[in-house]
Image (cartoon, helix red, strand yellow):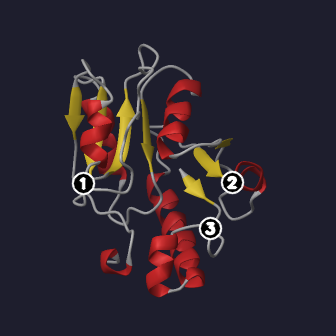
């Protein structure tokens, strides 16, 4: 999931620390490197873009990667929509602000879906950097309902929105929300 790297529209918490233009620049270059690392023949890489129309037409992202619009709503609405509209089979969703993310992390998450219905990649701040689902059945109607986003409760609330499902936890990785998180 990526946003168009426009100052004041992406990484705004980071932007409050280092300036909105610097935050947008960081995000653009972070995502470019991430996409190079994750473009792997073991999976099909798709960009879920926002804002919808600008992201679908953007020249910022590699032209060879297919794109779909994230659509409206909060993060849970947008991730839930992706998990519902993509073709059946395992899906992992990651954000663009995970500097330590590499192909081995994604491969481990997909492997965990063999024994689990869903997998999360925890972040040290109580959030998560990855959510994956096996998707042999439609995602539950309550998926991501009542999640306190951008808090220390995000991962726990997200897991609680999947009652009765087998949940796996993969590697813990840092995301970048503020200047203190920069590597």
For residue 119, above or below residue 18 = above
Check if mark 3's residue and mark 1's residue have beta carbons within 8 Å: no
Q: Position of residue 6 (x, y in %)?
A: 66, 71
The residue labelled by disc 1 is 126
- Residue 120 is drawn in which quadrant? top left
The residue labelled by disc 2 is 51
Tell me what residue is drawn at x 44 percent, y 58 percent. 37
Q: Position of residue 106 (x, y in %)?
A: 35, 45
Q: Position of residue 136 (x, y in %)?
A: 41, 14
Check if mark 2's residue and mark 1's residue have beta carbons within 8 Å: no
Side of 52 where 10 appears, left or right: left
- Mark earlier in primary sequence (3, 1): 3
Side of 30 where 172 appears, left or right: left
Task: Judge whether residue 118 can be spotted in this image.
Answer: yes
Closer to the camera, 78 or 83? 78
Which quarter of the image is occupied by the C terminus?
bottom left
The residue labelled by disc 3 is 9
Query: Distance of mark 3 from mark 1, alpha carbons?
Result: 24 Å
For residue 49, above or below residue 23 = above
Closer to the camera, 61 or 133? 133
- Mark earlier in primary sequence (3, 2): 3
Side of 166 where 175 appears, left or right: right
Q: Residues within 10 Å of mark 2 (few under 14, many from 20)?
A: some
Closer to the camera, 15 or 96? 15
């Amino acid at each position: 999931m990526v946003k168009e790297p426009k100052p004041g529209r992406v990484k705004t918490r980071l932007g409050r620390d280092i300036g909105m233009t610097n935050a947008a620049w960081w995000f653009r270059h972070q995502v470019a490197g991430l996409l190079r690392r994750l473009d792997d023949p073991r999976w099909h890489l798709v960009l879920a873009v926002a804002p919808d129309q600008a992201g679908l037409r953007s020249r910022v992202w590699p032209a060879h990667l297919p794109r779909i619009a994230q659509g409206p709503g909060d993060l849970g609405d947008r991730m839930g929509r992706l998990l519902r509209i993509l073709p059946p089979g395992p899906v992992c969703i990651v954000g663009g602000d995970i500097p330590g993310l590499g192909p081995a992390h994604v491969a481990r998450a997909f492997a965990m879906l063999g024994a689990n219905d869903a997998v999360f990649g925890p972040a040290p701040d109580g959030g998560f950097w990855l959510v994956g689902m096996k998707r042999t059945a439609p995602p539950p109607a309550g998926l991501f309902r009542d999640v306190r986003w951008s808090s220390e409760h995000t991962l726990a609330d997200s897991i609680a929105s999947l009652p009765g499902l087998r949940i796996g936890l993969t590697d813990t990785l840092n995301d970048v929300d503020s200047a203190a998180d920069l590597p």
